[in-house]
Every structure is written in structure tokens, then in C-alpha cells.
Image (cartoon, helix red, strand yellow):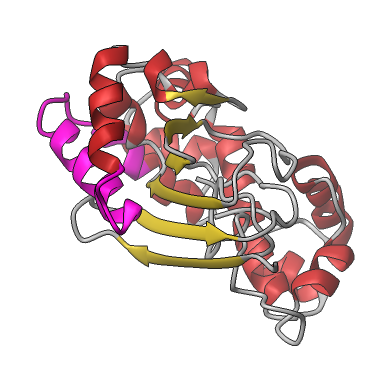
Amino acid sequence: MAAVYEERPSPLVPGAIVWRRTGAPGGPVLPDGCMDLLWVGGRLLVAGPDTGPHPAGEVPGGVFAGLRFAPGTAPALLGVPAHELRDRRVELADLWPEPEVRALAERMSAYEDPGAGLERLARSRAGRSAPHDPLASRVAAGLRSGESVAAVAAVVGLGPRQLHRRSLDAFGYGPRTLGRVLRLQRALELARRGLPQAEVAHRAGYADQAHLTREFRALAGTTPGAYAAAYAPEGAAASAGDPAGGSAAAKRETAQPSGSSTAA
């Protein structure tokens, strides 16, 4: 059965995306700077921030529901720095008391729409958690717009070491890596539109087409041409199940195109 992917903005969790994937897993999950809360086969899991492609099917299951948090917002809710979950998929019971997670799982099982259950779980937990680092959204916005790390550091009033430390806690990696990941997401979106590689490189902020190709290989494990061939608009279901792009699921192990928007 072909994978089907759908997503919607969460009205309950600011900046978050609720997504659902059914069917056979597609391509690998690509880095997107996000973290996801997952409901899979009666289990609650967390997908940490990725630095490279993760194989489809890493988390077994036929039906996935997920809540993809905006970059930098999940650590406060989960109660753990993002770098401790980098490139990992862990049981929520490894982070929270097991009896609490068991009770949450029982509640989740009662929801016809598991995504709605994840939203309510997150909203309830947020009311009892410390607020997320307000610096995170400013850093992510600056890097997403293509600003240099030095420029972002100056805007937020931090030195390089302080910015790096705060970024590790909020995003799972330093600002330079986050900038590369967010730039890759811009490139993935442009490539899915079928734009020529030279234009993708220019509009996404790469030095040239060779730079684009190197970054694709390093972060996505593929080439721009191969990605475009798989997910061009005229290809099959380019937006129906991508756990890898800005409009797909970030940790959503499904055929293209987050995440926590990025499986290519």
C-alpha cells in the first residue's frame, strides 16, 4: 500500500504541525531542525533533531501520528536539552515517569484522531513546564532568512560561545549546523517545484551549484538531481507523504515530501 501523508497547523500548540502517515514507509527522514512527539502502535515516542538522513522504517509501524514542534520549542516541554536527543528516537517513558506515560498512552488510545490527542497532551504539559528559550525563535528566524551566524549573534546580543551553547540546548546543534539544515529545507522545497539546480542554489543561498550538491550529499545522502527526479511536481504524490521537506513531515518516515518536514 502506498504511503499517504497529510498535515495541518496546530491551533493548540503555537508553531507546531500535526501530521499523519499511513502505508509503507518511503524514503529516508531528512534533517529539518525540528523535534516530534510520535504515536505509533500504542506507544509514545520522541524523535530528536537530526544531522543527517535516517532510514525509513527506523521506527516500525504502519500508522504514524505526530506533532512536529517549531525549532527550539520542544526541549522545555520535554524537560531535556535537545542535544541529548540528537539523531535519536526514544520512548517518552525514557524522559518522563513511566506511570505518567502509561496513563497518557491509555488516554491517547481513546482518541479517534491521535493527532488531536498529541496536541492536547502537549498543551497540558506546556502549562506545567518552563517557557521555551525566547532566544530560539529569533535565532531560527534569522538563520532561516539567510543571515550569517555572526549577524544573528549580534542581533541577539550573545558572543559566539554563548550562542553555540544556547543553540545546543534549544536545537540540538550549533547555529552553523542549524543554518545549514534550514538552508537545505529551502532547497528541498525549491527542488520539489522542479526549478533548475542553478536556480535552486541561488535562491536557497548556496555559493554555487557545486556547493548545493555537496550539502545535499552531506545532509540528505542524495543529490539534487535524484531528489528532484523523485519529488518533482509531475512525480508521484510529491506532497502526499514527505517526512522530509518543509511541507512534509520532519520525522515522518514516509515517501516524500518534517522532521520533526523532512523525509526525502
Residue 91 lies, in percent from the top left, at 46, 23
Above or below, comparing residue 14 to residue 139 in the picture: below
Residue 190 is situated, as x and y percent measured from the top left of the image, at 66, 72
Nearest the eye: 164 or 4: 4
Q: Quadrant of the N terminus?
A: bottom right
Depth check: give the residue in front, 17 or 62.
62
The magenta segment is: 109-138
The picture quadrant where one finds residue 165 is top left
Q: Viewed as shown, does residue 182 lie left or right of 82?
A: right
Quarter of the figure with residue 177: top right
- Please say whether residue 103 is one of the residues in the magenta stretch: no
Dominant secondary structure, magenta: helix
- Residue beneath the point at 55% across and 26% down: 173
The quadrant where residue 241 appears: bottom right
Question: Residue, x 10% and y 33% (percent of image)?
Answer: 127
Can the viewer see residue 16? no
Q: In this view, does 195 lie to the left or right of 190?
A: right
- Is 102 on the left or on the right of 51, as rendered? left
Looking at the image, is 29 positioned above or below residue 105? below
On the rendered image, what quadrant is the C terminus found in? bottom right
Q: Can you give x and y, in whole percent of width and height, for residue 263 in the image?
A: 66, 53
